[in-house]
Every structure is written in C-alpha cells, then in structure tokens.
Amino acid sequence: MNQFLITGATGNVGMEILKSLIRLDQESKIIIGVKDVLKTNLTSEMSRINLVRFDFIDTKTFMEALTGCDVLFLIRPPQLSEVEKIFTPLIEMAIKCRVKHIVFLSVQGVENSNLIPHHKIEKLIVQSKLAYTFLRPAYFMQNFTTTLRTDLVDKKRIFLPAGNSKFNLIDVTDIGEVAARILIEPYKHINQTYELTCNERLTFTQMAAELSNVLNTTIQYESPTLLKFFFVKRTEAMPTMLILVMMLLHYLPRFQKEPLMSDCVKQITGHQPNTFGQFIIENRNLLR
C-alpha cells in the first residue's frame, strides 16, 4: 500500500487526480496538502482522503506533510516564480523523508526554454537522484471554462494574440487519470517523461467554429496585437503577471513549429483522450 501526497489538490488537475484515485485505488492512503485544513471541505465521495497542512512558502510545513509519503505529486502554483528558494528545500526534505518517487506536472515544450520555471524544477528533480515522472500536458481545454470563460460567455468571442498558430489540447480529466495510474504503479514509470495531448491540432479559428456548432451560437475569434491585448485586459482588471503569462503562452507559438501529438494518454489509460468536441458537449452548461 502506497501513501500519496497530492499538492495543488483543490485545483482543476488535483481534483481530477483525486477522483481517479478514489475510483481506481481502494487501498492506498491519499493525503492532500492544503494551506488551511479547517477551511478545506471535501465531498462525501472523498471521505477517505486525509488532510495535512502544506504551504509552499512555509518550509516548516514540509516535514509533517512528507513524512511517510511514498509518492509525491508536485504542481507549481502559478504565482510562485522563485524556483530555487521554494523547490530546493522541498526536494531536500523529500529526500530526508525518504520519498521514493516524484510525479511532477510540467508543461509541453519545457525542454526548449530555460526561462520557464518548470524547466528549472525538472532540473532540480533530476539532480536530486529521486525517481521521477514528468507529465508535460498540452493546452488545457479547461482554459475555456476558467481564464477564457468571461470573453466566451459574455462577449461570444475568443480574444487571444495567437494568430493562426495550431495548438495541441488536453482535457484535464485525462491528465487526472494518467497521473493517478502513475501514482498507483510508479515503478512502471521511473524516470519517464510523457507528453499529454489529444489527437487534434487546432487553431483558435477552428476552436471557435467547434464551439459555435455545439453551443448553437456564433463565437468569433479575434487575434489582437500584443499592445491591444495588454490594454484591454488591464482595463478588465486582469493582473499584469497573468496578462504576461497569457501573452507568452499564446503569442510565442506563432514563431515555433507545430507541437507534436503523442499517444501517451492511450498507452497509460487504455483509452483515447477526449476530443475538443467531447469536452464542449460535456461542459456546454459552463460555456453558454
């Protein structure tokens, strides 16, 4: 029986991992690290999950959370940019607490840019000599139900400086099942890296067309200049750092090769990943 510590468990990916773990593994001990144990409410289906205080910026919480942990699922909160200050002591504590394996949620294309914090985190994990598995997911379909939702629902548009670039996509539910299966049987995935994509490459023009078709409305795609995008989002009170991240995520692909597709989801889960059309159907109430 393994003991898992899941960081970022209350986010989109973390919740999908928990759902899959509960469904697939009835024996292992599941612990989630949260900032405030008393304020964290779990559904009745998650009654077997244990809570422990864990805060990335409070190193004093690391030891208790990691003690007894066999496999650590590690996610980088987007607001944390000081990689060495935060993740070096965390990995050192993982070694001290005899963690056997780290599963890290990275990003697609991380190997090509040492400016991305995930690149530095991957390097720290490799240098630690701990067994690892790196998950490098493509563009989250759930961006349409979170960051992009206001434009989509209120203005019937996708407003991003992506031009005609094609993007790989991935449904977070598929990431959750992949991660859960690796956590359950980590010995099958020692020091492996997996690109997680669906079987489609789409431009935002094509995504807008699919959204229009399924939602029975007209969704327009507008690709603004960087200056216009920054100005519009600042007038909407979007934090400057988030605007810059969105610019980096959507503008740089215009100057890069089309991302490769992989069959890692099928290899690990035994089924094909969700298509973008399936995602829209399953989430249409949130997208209207």
Image: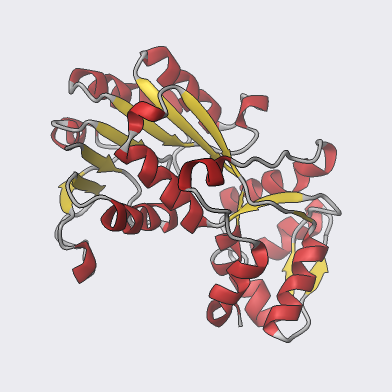
Using the image, determine if residue 31 lies above or below residue 69.
below
- Work out whether residue 199 or residue 280 is closer to the camera in this orientation and state it: 199
Say whether residue 112 is left or right of residue 104. Answer: right
Find residue 167 and report its horizontal and vertical position in percent: 73, 50
Residues 268 and 49: in front is: 268
What percent of the width, then of the height, locates residue 168?
Answer: 69, 49
Which colour style is shown? secondary structure
Which residue is drawn at the image coordinates 40% and 24% (left, top)? 190
Question: Where does residue 182 sit, x and y in percent of width and height?
Answer: 38, 38
Identify the residue at image location x=75%, y=79%: 213
Q: Quadrant of residue 83?
A: top left
One can see residue 236 in this view: no
10 versus 66 height, above or below: below
Front-lying residue, 254 or 273: 273
Q: Quadrant of the image for the C terminus?
A: bottom right
> In the displayed image of the protein, which residue is found farthest to the bottom?
216
- Locate the N terminus and report the quarter of the image it occupies: top left
Say which residue appears at 43% left-offset and 58% top-offset: 12
What residue is shown at x 39% (from left), y 34% (from top)? 103
With 275 as the anchor, is 1 left or right in this view? left
Q: Quadrant of residue 69?
A: top left
Q: Estimate the x, y position of residue 127 in percent, counting from the top left.
A: 42, 13
The total number of labels drawn is 0
Left or right of 192 in this view: 44: left
Task: Answer yes or no: is residue 206 visible.
Answer: yes
